[in-house]
Image (cartoon, rainbow, N blue to C red):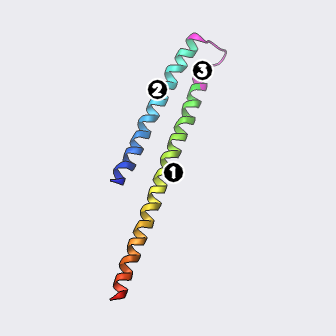
Amino acid sequence: MKNFQNFGLVMAANFETIVYMGLAWFFAGYLNTNYPQDYDWAKVTYVLGLILIARSWYVVFRVLIRSQQKLSHEAQATEGRLKDKTDAR
């Protein structure tokens, strides 16, 4: 079940990336139309979108690494218990 949760996190981060870039594109057009400046607002909104995407992927990787470490520790503990049972015989 944990593998499906991890897969879901990765897929959600991909959809989140699409949403952030779409919102950045939309708001860049809106700001260029309603608040014209000497520069293109897309430079600002895309950078903000990329920062949000980087934060999202950081969280995903952190959760995946913790999950992998937890599975590794559980496997080592199970292996140790099995080894103790065979040594007792």
Residue at left offset 44%, top offset 65%: 72
Picture disc at residue 79: none
Residue at left offset 43%, top offset 71%: 76
**Mark 1 lies on residue:** 62
SS label for mark 1:
helix
Q: Position of residue 53 (x, y in %)?
A: 52, 37
Q: Label 2 neighbourhood size at 10 Å, few (<14), some (14-19), many (20+)?
A: some
| Residues at marks 3 and 1 touching, judged by CB atoms closer than 8 Å | no
**Mark 3 lies on residue:** 41
**Mark 2 lies on residue:** 22
Q: CA distance from mark 2 to mark 3?
A: 14 Å
Residue at left offset 44%, top offset 59%: 68
| Residues at marks 2 and 1 touching, judged by CB atoms closer than 8 Å | no
Q: Is residue 56 above or below residue 87?
A: above
* Range shown magenta: 34-44
Q: Nearer the viewer, mark 2 or mark 1?
A: 1
